Image (cartoon, grey):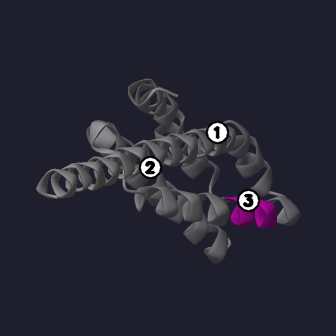
Amino acid sequence: MKKISIAFLILVISLLSGCSALEGAQNTLTYATEVTEFANEATAFAKDTPALARQAVSDKEAATELEASLQVMKTNIEEFNELEPPEIAADLHQQVVTQNENALKGIDLYLNNIKDGTLDPAVLENNEAFKSLGEIKNIVDQIRDLVGQ
């Protein structure tokens, strides 16, 4: 009877540890998917928004569209920053978060300018939002390599 109990205990422990490993793999896969989506959004934003921002200086409709785009990207950044990365990608995730913080400062600068009605073309040229979000793709590529995506 003891042998059966021990065998059963070993089976239960191995099943539980297997579930944990499976859950860890699933979390890593989910994280990799979210990183990829964020990288695509950030890349598109960094590519498309500067032209829209230049147009927004003299076009109220473009300014409204720019404001909406900035708000969406700000939300995406904040959601990404809250992700729990797998341990293997923690350092690279922090690098993205750092770039995101720079981008948020630039986005807030734009939003304040739009709100004040003084969207200055000089602000557009030196904005960190586009530079920071453009640099994220390289870090995200490293994360995807690490987690096997």
Residue 81 occupies quadrant: bottom left
Q: Tell me which residue sits at (51%, 57%) in the image.
A: 77
- The answer to whether marks 2 and 3 mark residues whose Cβ atoms lie closer than 8 Å is no
Residue type at mark 3: give it: Leu
Q: Secondary structure at mark 2?
A: helix
The residue wearing badge 1 is 40
Q: Secondary structure at mark 3?
A: helix
At 73% from the left edge and 41% from the top edge, which residue is drawn?
A: 48
Query: Where does label 3 land, which residue?
Result: 66
Residue 114 visible in image: yes
Q: How many numbered marks does the figure carry?
A: 3
Residue occupying image coordinates x 64% and y 49%: 121
* Amino acid type, callout 1: Asn
Measured from the top left, where is residue 20 in percent x and y? Answer: 34, 51
Judged by depth in the image, the label closer to the viewer, 1 or 3, is 1
Question: Magenta residues, as a range?
Answer: 63-69
Badge 1 crowding class, 10 Å Cα cut-off, few under 14, some 14 to 19, many 20 or more, is some
Q: Is residue 117 above or below residue 20?
A: below
